[in-house]
Amino acid sequence: MSFPEPSDVGPAVGGNLPVSETDRGKVVTLLESAYAEGRITTAEHAERMQAAADAETFDDLVPLTRDLVALDAPSAPTPSWSQAPGQAGAEPELIVTLFGSTERRGRWQPRRNLSVLNLFGGTVLDLREAIFTDNTCEINVFCLFGGIEVLVPEGTELENRALAVFGGAGAKVTTPPAPGAPKVVLRGFVGFGGVDARVKRLKKKD
């Protein structure tokens, strides 16, 4: 199979930058996860892994993962701090955005430890209808030349421990913590970009 040439990356946004082993490792991790979940075949997995090993620039890596970002469709509202039984000890989750955009919305289950890699892209984590697997959700970010937006329900406790260099990281709370509500903690590094966590009320559905 062949991978289509991406049309929205290139020297203007850094697509011609050399690939580091860390960059290559993140892509390999995503490919392994997609293969384990059955989203790519054995042949696709092998070919993409070889392409990742041969990649020399970001432009070489982008098409290998572009079709592996799953968007969760919105559904009926539920109590935002409901917990999924038996999920507190689940493995950490990794969300990768490379030269594109990723969104998680509606009823989804953020793990206690959620890692977000964002390079030259945008990531939105909407936790307002999420089913939390633990009363605390730690979001570990690594963001370069991009932005991460975290939306939480009213009553959520927010804590910002992220380090920003030539960028910004903030957590804004407009309502006091509610009894039993989850706590969201931001950690990690932001360079030449921004991470914004804030409370946003859900619009009423007809």
Image (cartoon, rainbow, N blue to C red):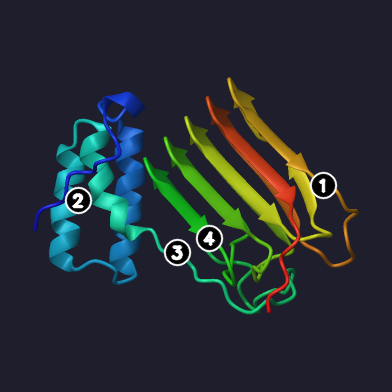
53 sits left or right of 202 in the view: left
Tell me the quarter of the picture where residue 70 sits: bottom left
Tell me the quarter of the picture where residue 74 sits: bottom right
190 sits left or right of 28 in the view: right
Direction left: furthest residue: 1
Direction top: furthest residue: 166
Q: Residues within 10 Å of mark 1 (few under 14, many from 20)?
A: some
Which sits earlier in the primary sequence, circle 1 or circle 2?
2
Give the distance between the C-alpha atoms of the residues marked 3 and 2, in whole angstroms.
23 Å
Give the distance between the C-alpha atoms of the residues marked 4 and 3, in whole angstroms.
6 Å
Q: Residues within 10 Å of mark 3 (few under 14, many from 20)?
A: few
Return the residue nearer the eye: 165 or 149.
149
Quadrant of the image containing the C terminus:
bottom right
Residue placed under numbered mark 2 in the picture: 49
Which sits earlier in the primary sequence, circle 2 or circle 4?
2
Residue placed under numbered mark 3 in the picture: 71
150 sits left or right of 120 in the view: right
Mark 1 lies on a secondary structure that is loop
Return the residue nearer the eye: 122 or 21.
122
Residue 191, position in %: x, y?
53, 26
Residue 104 is marked as: 4
